[in-house]
Image: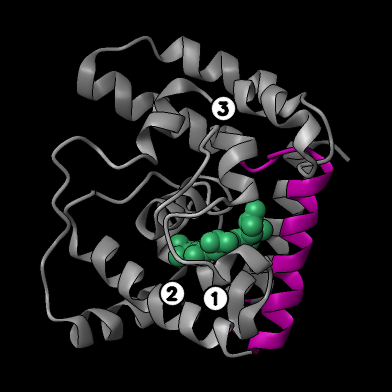
Amino acid sequence: MDTESHRKELLRKLSRNLMVSVPVMTVVAMAGMSAVSENGLGLIPSAEAAQGEAEGEAKGEAEGEAKGEAEGEAEGEGEAEGEGEAEGEAEGTSEAMKEAVRRPAGYEPYDGDAESLAKKGEALFSDTSLSANGLSCAMCHTGGNLYKDTFANEYPHFVAMGKSDFGMDKVHLDEMVQICMVAPMAAEPLDWDSEELAALTEYMRIEQDTFQKR
Ligand code: HEC
């Protein structure tokens, strides 16, 4: 099955199942992940296109380049794992996309009360409207799903997806939120100074705490 029909099938399943329980949703989300691993970052092209548009509007930059690279990515190799192919994969993600998940210069996160941020973050974690493909963070990560052992390490740290798809040696926690926003969620990154990003980041600290104690 090609990437596009695989995605359509996934979206059909998702919309059919939106009312059902979390375990079923998780299974559907896992199907989504297999789309990711079978096709390289199969879910990225739409995010790339969206990003291209955003960049084009914002800075009048060439949108065609981002789209062209997105197509190259879709034809790319299968496995996302393994140090060996990290270089090749990194070339597949557009420069705009790599830039978008890195902390900007002079970055000042939204400053809020940790407890209320965590609460908002918990709600956002299950919010499918954050993504462009019907997924929520929770569909992949409920019960500590899909996190690798690196999640237990103090940030910033090495994350396989950060290296292979974005060429980053180390990622901060808020950068990891942005990576999952643009890659598996196929969405645009959150505004760096937004309450949403601060909230999700704060909630992920609690997730990390739970993960460390597992
Ligand atoms: C389609 C499934 C999927 C969705 C949806 C998803 N993620 Fe992830 N996430 C992954 C995978 C796969 C990894 C493991 C990446 C790695 O270690 O290379 C991961 C890893 C992570 C990590 C830990 C990285 C580390 O080792 O330090 C964090 C934090 C995270 N995701 C946050 C989020 C947030 C926040 C959202 C929602 C905005 C989200 N994820 C949505 C698949 C997903």
Rendering quadrant holding ligand 1? bottom right
**In the image, 137: left or right of 2?**
left
* Mark 2 C-beta to ligand 1 under 8 Å: yes
Q: Is residue 135 visible?
A: no
Residue type pointed to by label 2 = Phe
User: Which is in the foreground here, disc 1 or disc 3?
Assistant: 3
Which residue lies under the disc numbered 3?
Answer: 93
Look at the image and tell me whether residue 160 can be seen. yes
> What is the distance, in whole Å, between disc 2 and disc 3 at their CAs?
25 Å
Q: Quadrant of residue 118?
A: bottom left
Please say if 116 is above or below 111. Answer: below
Residue shown at 22% from the left, 18% from the top: 59
Q: Earlier in the sequence, mark 2 or mark 3?
A: 3
At x 62%, y 47%, the residue is 161
Task: Compare residues 40 and 80 and report the one nearer the observer.
Answer: 80
On the image, the x and y values in percent for residue 89 come to 68, 28
Instruction: State whether label 1 is within 8 Å of ligand 1.
Output: yes
* Position above or below: 212 against 196: below
Which amino acid type is marked by label 3? Thr
Residue 180, image x and y in percent? 51, 54
**Looking at the image, is 109 positioned above or below residue 47?**
below
Q: Tell me the tag on residue 125.
A: 2
Crowding around mark 1 (Cα neighbors within 10 Å: few <14, some 14 to 19, many 20+) is many
Between discs 1 and 3, the one toward the N terminus: 3
Q: Which residues are magenta?
A: 18-44
Rate crowding at label 3 as few (under 14), some (14 to 19) or many (20 or more) other CA atoms within 10 Å. Answer: many
Q: Quadrant of the N terminus?
A: top right
Residue placed farthest to the right in the image?
1
Which type of secondary structure does the marked residue at label 1 adopt?
helix
The residue under label 1 is 138
- In the depicted view, which residue is nearer to us: 60 or 179? 179
